[in-house]
Image (cartoon, rainbow, N blue to C red):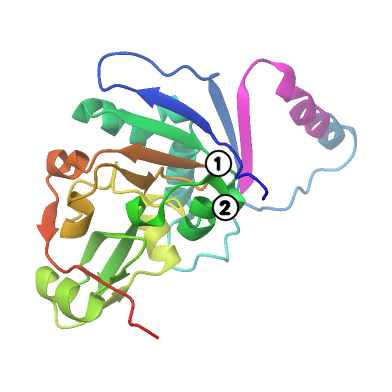
Amino acid sequence: MKGRERSRVKKYDGTEGDLKDPPLQVQVALSMPDVRQGKAARQDRNSRKNSQSDGYSHHRFQLGINTLPNISIHKIAAKCIMWLMTPSDSPVVAALKSLGVAFELIDIDPAFADTTAFCEKYGYPVDQSANTILVASKRGPKQYAACVVLATHFLDVNKRVRKVMGVSRASFASAEEMMELTGMQVGGVTPLALPPDLPLYVDDRVMRCEWIILGGGGRALKVKTSPEVFTKLGAKTVEGLGMEPKAK
């Protein structure tokens, strides 16, 4: 039987200390055509190719202006830069350190960021992995909430979530809303480093786990920590926030 792939793990015991990574430089391109011609354009492209050798960790990405309608492209670019920081500099690690909880950072292949695929590839139990789901109201003034349930359960949006949010109708937020509000992508959403005014609800089953796996803010990172983190974040524990799958 083929063994599961091992991931790179960095441990932090909740005391003062540093997780070292190379410094980061990020280039952002807003998918605009390069209208420059001739020698100047070629020199600039060659300069960007050669910049990898200067001792920095580089990330370059493009944002299509027409792919996220009605959302400020500059706001999204700023959030993307924040989440492309090296793990030791990321808002997630800063939040965990400020809470004083022990945690592990798990570097993964982004292609396996979805919870089921991650657990299968790296050998973590699904019943100790949690999904963070952003929910939006459908009527009246727009309201949002982040909900955390075990990967073995479904979020009860129509009853429990709607009730705790105090709205008449609610549904899953779109990927565009998620990006604008949190700067995170599907598969990497984490309850850590969320906007301070965003309500956070956690299913009571999550709180009974010895430890849990959470998203790391991006598709290349997971976090292993104690459910104690939710108490320190001020999350509200909700009984029955998640529903067990119906028997077939």
Up/down of 159 relative to 34, above or below: below
Locate residue 132, reporting x and y percent. Answer: 32, 57
Q: Amino acid at mark 1?
A: Ile
| Closer to the camera in the image, 21 or 34 | 21
Question: Magenta span covers which residues?
Answer: 44-62
Mark 1 in CB contact with mark 2 (< 8 angstroms): yes
Residue beneath disc 1: 108
Locate residue 221, reporting x and y percent. Answer: 48, 41
Locate residue 161, reporting x and y percent. Answer: 18, 71
Up/down of 7 relative to 29, above or below: above
Quarter that holds the C terminus: bottom left
Helix, strand or loop for disc 1: loop
| Closer to the camera in the image, 68 or 213 | 213
Residue beneath disc 2: 112
| Residue ID at (57%, 50%) | 121
Helix, strand or loop for disc 2: helix
| Closer to the camera in the image, 24 or 172 | 172
| Closer to the camera in the image, 174 or 105 | 105
Left or right: where 125 falls relative to 207: right
Left or right: where 185 falls relative to 207: right
